[in-house]
Image (spheres, rainbow, N blue to C red):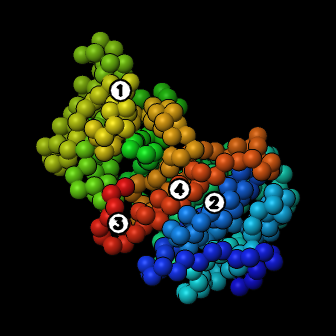
Amino acid sequence: MTDASTQPAGLAREDGAGRRPRIGITMGDPAGIGPEVVLKAVAEREVLEACAPIIIGDAQLLAHTARTLDLQCGYEIVRRGEHLPEAWDETLIYHLDNINASIEPGVESGVAGRASGEYIEAAVELCAAGELDAISTAPINKRALFLGGYSFPGHTEFLARLTGAEDCAMAFVADNLRIVLISTHVPLSEAIRLVEKDRIVRVMRLTDRELKRWGIARPRIAVAALNPHGGEGGLFGIEESAEIIPAVEACREGDRIDATGPFSADTVFLRASRGEFDAVISCYHDQAMIPVKCLSFGEAVNVTLGLPFIRTSVDHGTAFDIAGRGVAGHSSMVAAIKLAARLSRADESGKAVEAI
């Protein structure tokens, strides 16, 4: 191992609680705010008390970011291909050395996109080898990822391909609100087409299974309606009667899932945030993101359901407009890392440390 700089290393916790989970934290797009929010997050005592952070990225760029923004980066370095030290319980940088050109903050590039994709691949490799307990990802830029040679619309689809997971879903956790999406980054016209019985059933089954892993013994799952007023008996649309209601009935009768709906989308998320439901199935991306960001912007966490390991992420993008300026908030990165640690402990023990 080598040292990224001469500044002090991370803070270790010595409280007799046993080994803290190792959370791999991908640096995200190097031209975005990922390097900044990751360095800020792993310097927080609450993060260091929750886990042993492993930053997966480029050590030189991280050190440059730290110098430019006056952030801490005095962490030991492990190079790709080397094993993480078994006894180490502090912050490490897993260095890929994969940036062979200058990166300009706020500018899309194939170099940055390729690097961000390789950080994700490395994180999955480390999880598969049992060297990480979970991963938490900084934001990527989808256009840059494409320019870098990857044809995935986002982390969810990328991780599903890397792990061979058959059923995955994007979910968001924000205080008392948990929302799972039927579809992710697709045109609205395509999202409407994807509101179909079999797909809804798969998402509800996955949600029920994953929430039980999180410590919720009998999850109460609501399904949001697609159309205004739940279709108003077919007057405003037929997807509720043709697809959503049959899916809810199939899950209730065939799988004994506590599923209800469809409920009008203008009230169901508020009802869930007040404790009436444990999760809401959302019909499309923005239907989910509007309540999440209105209620908990900067504090919400993106969770991928259905993977063989825990993966969390921030609720924001690369923010190219403020990259390199030192003004990016890191609260969502902190929340994502802490939730990954909590979920990984629950998953490893087979029972929840506390209900999430």
Distance between the Cα atoms at labels 2 and 1?
A: 34 Å
Marked residue nearer the N-terminal end (4 or 1):
1
Q: How many numbered discs sit on the rendered protein?
A: 4
Marked residue nearer the N-terminal end (1 or 3):
1
Distance between the Cα atoms at labels 4 and 1?
A: 27 Å
Expressed as whole percent of the image width and height from the top left, the position of residue 260 reads: 23, 36
Residue 41: give its label: 2
Give the label, 2 or 1, closer to the camera. Answer: 2
Residue 353: give its label: 3
**Label 1 sits on what residue type?**
Thr
Distance between the Cα atoms at labels 1 and 3?
A: 31 Å
Relative to the observer, which residue lies in front, 41 or 179? 41
**Label 2 sits on what residue type?**
Ala
Q: Residues within 10 Å of mark 3 (few under 14, many from 20)?
A: some
Distance between the Cα atoms at labels 2 and 3?
A: 23 Å
Q: Residues within 10 Å of mark 4 (few under 14, many from 20)?
A: many
> Label 1, on which residue?
267
Marked residue nearer the N-terminal end (4 or 3):
4
Give the label, 4 or 3, closer to the camera. Answer: 3
Instruction: Classify residue 339 as left or right of residue 219.
Output: right
Expressed as whole percent of the image width and height from the top left, the position of residue 278 reads: 31, 45
Give the label, 1 or 3, closer to the camera. Answer: 3
Q: Residue at x 29, y 28 (%)?
A: 263
Q: Residues within 10 Å of mark 1 (few under 14, many from 20)?
A: few
